[in-house]
């Protein structure tokens, strides 16, 4: 896969969020593989693993880390809720992942269209292709999806 942006969020039990924004130094895209799709024992030069992906030609990208505290963060037994809006990200073809704390096994995640102005959340458009993966060896859940330009059919209507 070739992307012009990779965005990986890591949520901590305290409600802290660490975001890695990875972009190429120029306008070109850079190669990426999902770790689940490759033999991770083999490692080429100039690669780096971030969460659930491997980035090739790592010297061609710029990584910016941002740390913040999630607003409206609620952690209860067997349930976590928070609101996180990434607005206005300039992307043609990108990758997004959110990594949850070790031991949290996520089985349902809703990602809503941030530009849908409906007040009732159950009526908002939902992102259509979110993969939720449990990494047994790391005891970690993460969700991932490809980000696309707003000109593509990325969201589906609520059921």
Image (cartoon, rainbow, N blue to C red):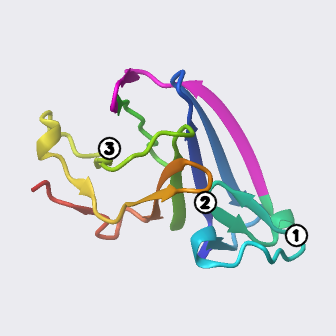
Residue occupying the point 66% across, 72% down: 32
Q: Earlier in the sequence, mark 3 or mark 1?
A: 1
Q: Would you say residue 90 is visible in this rendering?
A: no
Which one is in front, 135 or 65?
Answer: 135
Residue 41 % position (x, y): 78, 74
Q: Is residue 99 magenta?
A: no
Q: At numbered mark 2, what does the secondary structure look like: helix, strand or loop?
A: loop
Prevailing secondary structure class for the magenta stretch in the rendered image: strand
- Separation of residues labelled 1 and 2 (CA atoms): 17 Å
Label 3 crowd (10 A; few <14 / some 14-19 / many >=20)? some
Residue that badge 1 annotates:
46
Residue that badge 2 annotates:
52
Comparing marks 1 and 2, which lies closer to the viewer?
2
Image quarter where the C terminus lies is bottom left
Residue occupying the point 62% across, 51% down: 138
Which one is in front, 67 or 98?
Answer: 98
Q: Is residue 138 above or below residue 93?
A: above
Residue occupying the point 83% across, 74% down: 43
Q: Is residue 40 above or below residue 19?
A: below
Image quarter where the N terminus lies is bottom right
Q: Would you say residue 20 is visible in this rendering?
A: yes
Q: Is residue 69 magenta?
A: yes
Label 2 crowd (10 A; few <14 / some 14-19 / many >=20)? some
Residue that badge 3 annotates:
114
Q: At numbered mark 3, what does the secondary structure look like: helix, strand or loop?
A: loop
Q: Earlier in the sequence, mark 3 or mark 2?
A: 2
Report which quarter residue 69 is drawn in: top right
């Amino acid at each position: 896969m070739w992307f012009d942006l990779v965005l990986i969020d890591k949520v901590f039990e305290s409600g802290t969020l660490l975001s890695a924004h990875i972009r190429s130094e120029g306008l070109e895209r850079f190669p990426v593989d999902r770790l689940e799709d490759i033999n991770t024992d083999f490692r080429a030069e100039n690669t780096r693993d971030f969460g659930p992906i491997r980035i090739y030609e790592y010297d061609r990208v710029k990584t910016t880390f941002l740390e913040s505290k999630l607003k409206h963060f609620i952690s209860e037994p067997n349930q976590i809720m928070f609101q996180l809006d990434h607005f206005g990200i300039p992307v043609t073809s990108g990758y997004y992942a959110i990594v949850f704390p070790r031991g949290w096994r996520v089985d349902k995640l809703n990602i809503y269209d941030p530009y849908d102005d409906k007040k009732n959340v159950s009526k908002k458009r939902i992102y259509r292709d979110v993969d939720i993966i449990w990494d047994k060896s790391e005891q970690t859940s993460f969700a991932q999806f490809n980000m696309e330009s707003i000109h593509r059919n990325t969201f589906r209507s609520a059921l």
